[in-house]
Image (cartoon, rainbow, N blue to C red):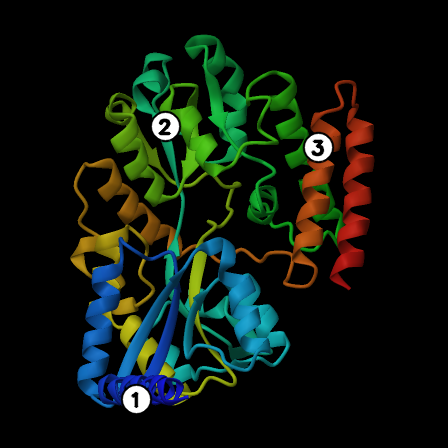
Amino acid sequence: MLKKFFLTALLILICVAGALFYIKNKDPREEFTLWTIQLKPVATQVIEDTIREFETNHPEINVTWVDIPISEAQKRTLASILGGNPPDLINLNPDFSVILAQRGALDYFSEEEAKKLSKSATDMLRYEDKIFALPFYATSSVTLYNAQTYNACGYSEVPKTYEELYNIAPQLKNCSNIYPLAINLNENDSLAKILNKYGINTFETEEEIQKAIFVYEMFNDMYKKNLISKDTLNINHREMAEKYMSNNASFVVLGSNFLNMVKENAPEIYAKSNISTQLTSKGGKYDIALMNLIIPKYAKHKALAHEFAALLTDKKAQIELAKLTNVIPINEDTLNDDYFSKCNTDIIAKARCESIKQLSNSGNKDFGSKNKKEINDAINKTAETILLNNSITKTQIEKEVRTLAKRVNELRQ
């Protein structure tokens, strides 16, 4: 009995000592939580610099930074909000952010907070004319092409639109014996974005339907004539880039981050390459991909979150982020820096300057945030039906597109 008493007392003493040690060593500062999407390790320096500045301004605050894989971002964000314990500031994509705004789950930003940021980017982040997120950074693809092959085939002026490339594709294929274009039509919203470039975003007018018929006919013709690869409906963005790197395509539309991959993994191809503007339609705008910052409505430190978001989008942080990652900054003062206007002949530097120019001519309207996945699935399914039917006629293509238009309009209601 005595032995049992001493053992119990010893356990109590150990627990008390542990508790006292925890209390003594626990950080007395209030915790502020930041979530980002796959910014480590490339953007570690700029995030940590911002955290140090913020903690210097607020010595009572300890910032916890969590970097999340892109595949888990939406699930974890939704779970944290539904659980009533969300982080204070989250780096997220606009598509999911607007859904949260529609459900009343976000705090809004003022016009004053956004006044130094790209207007075209900010306007993409409005719901009922209120700013539900601040733009954080953007990417804008450019056209990478094998200049040596292209010039050897007798061409000099680089195509700026899909149809210009389409018109020379047969001759380019005969000369080079490789695919004129590497493209992935069914990954996420790739084809939807191409339709948007042609001013197709509702399918409500006959003009939009006729444009869509042209786009589907163009890619169907390229597919049937073996001018784009037979796995065009299956490959992802990286596999598309690999086709170019393995000298199986003359042209490819890629984000600036993929240019480093080409440089490192296919230096011989990179040495023969050059860049041009992103392929679009005649008079069409350029597509940009945007990442933003949101503040959950029930975050514990909303005022501090607004302040931290301002630091991440100020000129200093934005130029540091751009130099580390090759993304496009959204701070107007940063965009006016010489770094984004005086680029040397290196492909990556030229792509940086070209992307900045494209930002000022961006902002295609998409099909809206309602039922986005279902709309993309319908667009992709139509492409599969058309391209995989070896005997399809123009009349049948028109019928498929009109059926698609009806379905999209149902989903947008």
Could you say which is closer to the camera, residue 386 or residue 19? 19
Q: Earlier in the sequence, mark 1 or mark 2?
A: 1
Question: Helix, strand, or loop for circle 3?
Answer: helix
Q: Which residue is mark 3?
A: 384
Q: Earlier in the sequence, mark 1 or mark 3?
A: 1
Q: Are marks 1 and 2 in contact (CB under 8 Å)?
A: no
Horizontal side of 59 relative to 106 (left or right) equals left
**Placement of 83 over or under 261, stated as above or below:** below
> In the rendering, at what x and y percent does residue 240 appear?
47, 31
Q: Is residue 115 visible?
A: no
Residue drawn at (61%, 31%) of the image: 233
Q: Quadrant of the N terminus?
A: bottom left
Q: Quadrant of the C terminus?
A: bottom right
Q: Earlier in the sequence, mark 2 or mark 3?
A: 2
Horizontal side of 315 relative to 397 (left or right) equals left
**Placement of 335 over or under 349, stated as above or below:** below
> In the rendering, at what x and y percent does residue 131 appear?
49, 77
Residue drawn at (33%, 57%) of the image: 39
Q: Which residue is mark 1?
A: 13
Could you say which is closer to the camera, residue 270 or residue 305? 305
Residue drawn at (26%, 66%) of the image: 47
Residue drawn at (33%, 13%) of the image: 152
> In the rendering, at what x and y percent does residue 323 appear?
21, 54
Q: Which residue is mark 2?
A: 145
